[in-house]
Amino acid sequence: MNTANQRLFNQTGKGSNLVEQEVQRDDIGFGTKLTDSRSRLVNQDGTFNIVRVNGTLWDRLNVYNRLITMGWLQFMSWLVVFYVTANTFFAGVYMLAGPDMLKAASEKALYGPFWKCFFFSSQTLTTVGYGHIAPDSFLTSSIAAFESMVGLLAFALATGLLYGRFSRSVAHIRFSKQAVLAPYLDVNGWMFRIINTRSNQLVNLEVSVSMSRLEPRADGTLYRKYYGLSLERNKVAFFPTNWTIVHPITQNSPLYGCTPEDLEASDTEFLISLQALDDTFVQNVHTRFSYRFDEVLWGYKFRPMFDGTQTMPIQLDLTKLDDVQETPLN
C-alpha cells in the first residue's frame, strides 16, 4: 500500500465494514469496482464512459434517441440517405415490373428507363405528382399506391423528428477547461466556472459536485469511494452572468491536506451534475461534466469576465471563461 493511499485511508478513520456502508450511501451510481485509473467516469461532453455489450440489436440501435440527439448535419445527411435509398429501391421495383409500364410525356428528357423510374418514384413518394410520368398498368398503379402510403408515413415520422429536435430543450452550459485551486477567504478553495452561452434564461440553477477517488481497504485492495463536496453556494435563482462554483477546503473537506501527488495517486475525479429550468420551453434541463486530477491548476484563480466598465448593458466576454492568473495559496 503506497504512502498516499495510506494517508487517504487514515483520513476516513473508519473500519472496513463501516467504510463499505458509507460507500453505499455516497455512491452516485458507478459502484466501487471501477478502479481503472487510465480513464474517466464522465466524459467532458457529459456522456458516461460506459459501453453496453451483448444487448439486443434494437437496444443497441436506439434509433429514436440517436436521431434526436445527433448533430444537425448528421441528421440531415441521414434524411438524404433515406430519401435516395427509398427512391432507388422503388425505382428497382418499377424496373422489375417493366419501365414500359410507366407512361412519360417525353422520353428524351429522362436519360433512360432507370431515371424514368427513379423520378416517378420521387414524385410518388413525396406525393408531388407533376403528371408527365404516370403508371400505365394495374401492377405499377398498385406499387405507386403502396409507395404513396410509405411516403406519407415516412414524412410524418421525419416531421415528428424535426419537431422533437426543435422542441427539445438543451442546456448550453460551457464549463471552464480546467478547475483551479485558489485562495478563498481565509482558506483555499477548489473552483470551476460556468457560463450560459445562449441568450435564453435559465432559472433555479442547481449544481452538485462529487469527488471520486481510489482508497485502500484493510486488506490492501483498492475500491472507489465518493464524497459529496459542500459548496459555498449550490443554487442561484437567476443565471445572467458567469458563476464560479467554490468548494471551501476546510478541515472537514476530503481535499484537506491533499497535494497534487495525492490526487494523482488516488485517481481523483470531480463529477459535476447541473440542472435548471429553461424559461423559454418551461422545461428542466440538465448537463454533466467532470475534471480529473490533472485538470486542476494549483495556485491559480480566474480573471474577471466583465469589460471593467460600469455602463449598461454590462458586457460579458465569453472568450475569457478560461482566463486565469497565478495566485499564491493560503
Image: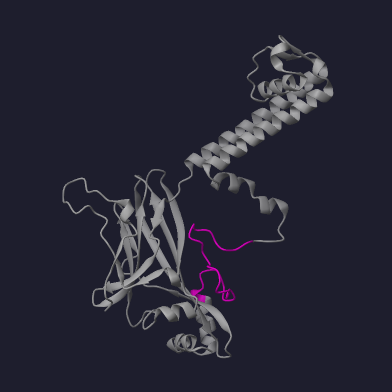
Q: Quadrant of the N terminus?
A: bottom right
Q: Quadrant of the C terminus?
A: bottom left
What residue is at 65 percent from the left and 32 percent from the top?
Answer: 83
Give the side of residue 307 with respect to residue 29, left or right.
left
Q: Is residue 198 above or below residue 214?
A: above
What residue is at 67 percent from the left and 24 percent from the top?
Answer: 122
State which quadrant residue 191 falls in: bottom left
Q: Is residue 55 visible?
A: yes
Foreground residue among 258 and 59: 258
- In the rendered structure, does residue 4 fall within the stretch colored magenta? no
Furthest residue in direction left, as rendered:
310
Foreground residue among 36 and 326: 326
Which secondary structure class fits the magenta region best? loop
- Magenta-drawn segment: 25-51
Q: Position of residue 180 (x, y in %)?
A: 35, 69
Q: Position of residue 137 (x, y in %)?
A: 81, 15
Q: Position of residue 114 (x, y in %)?
A: 76, 22
Q: Is residue 194 above or below residue 136?
A: below
Furthest residue in direction top, as rendered:
105
What residue is at 39 percent from the left and 70 percent from the top?
Answer: 296
Q: Is residue 5 above or below residue 110?
A: below
State which quadrant residue 149 falls in: top right
